[in-house]
Amino acid sequence: MAQASSSPTLRGNLPGFAITSEPGWLPPQHPAAAAVAAVTKAADGRDLGRISLYGPVAVDERFQGRGVLTRLLTALSRALAEDFDLAVAFVETANQRSLAVHRHYEMAEAAHFEAGGRTYVAFTFSPAAFAQGQS
């Protein structure tokens, strides 16, 4: 089931949004499906529990640096915490800014993979832990 979380509008503007979905909703050739496969392979047989995909996430540049992303991720994590054990995101290695953001939030770099001729990093985090302030 796809979900969306948005930050409260500030003076009629939408500062940002975050989208989640379940892995089975995407075709196998999609990079998100490859991210889940890479994370599962890297787990080397460990049970990862119920997995949700997270992303894309976007914050209007006028609102960046004002805590919007933290509020979005916290709301998203609270919404996912009861139904999912692990959230998986993927970031193209060329996107240094997004890589830095995911690392800032201490999301685990669970795997590196290629899809469609591009190289990605798969990040994971526990929605329950993030919702409680621990990623």
Image (spheres, rainbow, N blue to C red):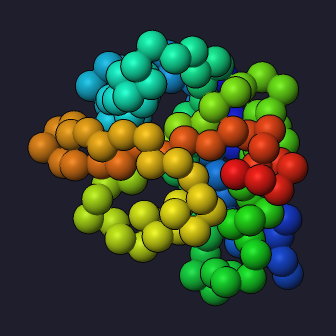
Q: Nearer the viewer, residue 77 or 41?
A: 41
Q: Residue furthest left?
A: 117
Q: Is residue 48 above or below residue 96?
A: above
Q: Is residue 51 above or below residue 16?
A: above
Residue under the image location 69 percent in, 66 percent down: 69
Residue 14 visible in the shown view = no
Q: Position of residue 96 (x, y in %)?
A: 35, 71
Residue under the image location 87 percent in, 50 percent down: 132
The mark tally for this picture is 0
Q: Is residue 12 left or right of residue 89?
A: right
Residue 24 visible in the shown view = yes
Residue under the image location 80 percent in, 33 percent down: 81
Q: Is residue 34 above or below residue 9?
A: above
Q: Position of residue 134 (x, y in %)?
A: 77, 53
Q: Is residue 113 left or right of residue 40?
A: left
Q: Is residue 88 above or below residue 67?
A: above
Q: Position of residue 111 (x, y in %)?
A: 36, 40
Q: Position of residue 87 (x, y in %)?
A: 61, 36
Residue under the image location 85 percent in, 81 percent down: 11
Q: Is residue 27 left or right of residue 29?
A: right
Say which quarter of the image contains residue 71: bottom right
- Image quarter where the N terminus lies is top right
Q: Nearer the viewer, residue 58 or 108?
A: 108
Say which quarter of the image contains residue 45: top left
Q: Is residue 42 left or right of residue 124?
A: left
